[in-house]
Image (cartoon, grey):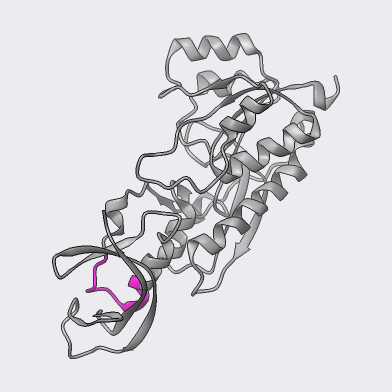
Amino acid sequence: MENKDKKILFFGFSDVGYKCLKYMVDSGYNVIGVFTHDTDPHESKWFESPESLARENLIPVFKPDTLKTEKWFRKVRYMKPDLILSLYYRNMIPEEIFSQAKYGAYNMHGSYLPYYRGRAPLNWAIINGEKFGGVSLHVMEKKFDTGAVVDQEKVEFADDEYVGQIQPRIAEAALNVFKRSLDSLLDGNPKTVPQDATKASYFGKRTPEDGKIDFSKTAREVFNLIRGVSKPFPGAFADIGGTETIIWRAKIGEDSRGISAGTVVSLDPLTVACADKFIVAEETQPRR
């Protein structure tokens, strides 16, 4: 059987999911179904939808709240996929489903594994002051992001870049990895490299409330939070004069030692003392 005749079952979301699905559709691969989900209520719709692309191409779409039911186990068994792909799908895919794929199941994770396993890896990497992120295509296992790596690509970024500037490069890296790897996955013999578990780090899901600024931290730490959760994410915020205010963009100012952390010394531009220096806002708005 030719690779483009083999049955691919797609689980995906976000810009990475869309780009990889579009590549398969445009290239004539046999995608037999698309599992996806809706955008979370608190997040902006900043990417094109795998769902709309699938419907335009008459591919069946499924959006279950959970896959952990006998109904979906039976459904996937009935579909008899040759390959299962998870491309930024947010829900857990049970072993009862991913084990059904004849040639295996693989997940695209948004970090340079084994670093930053878990949720929101790019946001966390920026918040923690890292100099790079990346993407990794790996074997799907019961535990998140632990499987052997098929291919990966590192994405470097400057210490003043915002998440909205970096994410498009992450998506392009994911597409590069996907294009390089897809035929080997369909052949059933990709080369894999086990992860070094001694270097692994894990970070959990972030919520909008996690964007609250703690000005008792250094200005660099506050700045990293601001750029790590800025647009298109919900943003970093603080109570300024009784109004919750999002700081979308900022810069690190002069030495603030001797002034209590959290002290607002100017409203135009908004300037707040941190543990060592001022943070000077460049773009703000009231938080709704």
| The N terminus - image quarter | top right
How far across and down, in percent of the image, does residue 207 sit? 32, 48
Q: Residue at x 37, y 65 (%)?
A: 225
Q: Residue at x 72, y 50 (%)?
A: 176
Q: Is residue 215 magenta?
A: yes
Q: How many numbered marks does the figure carry?
A: 0
Q: Which residues are magenta?
A: 213-222
The image quadrant that residue 80 belongs to is top right
Q: Is residue 254 magenta?
A: no
Q: Closest to the observer: 83 or 266?
A: 266
Q: Main secondary structure of the magenta part?
A: loop
Q: Is residue 26 above or below residue 242?
A: above
Q: Is residue 116 above or below residue 32?
A: below
Q: Closest to the observer: 53 or 80?
A: 53
How far across and down, in percent of the image, does residue 86 sit? 58, 34
Q: Residue at x 44, y 57 (%)?
A: 123
The image quadrant that residue 29 belongs to is top right
Q: Is residue 137 visible?
A: yes
Q: Is residue 205 above or below residue 239?
A: above
Q: Is residue 84 visible?
A: no
Q: Residue at x 77, y 21 (%)?
A: 6
The image quadrant that residue 263 belongs to is bottom left
Tell me if 127 is positioned left or right of 81 in this view. left
Tell me if 134 is positioned left or right of 175 in this view. left
Residue most toward the right?
Answer: 2
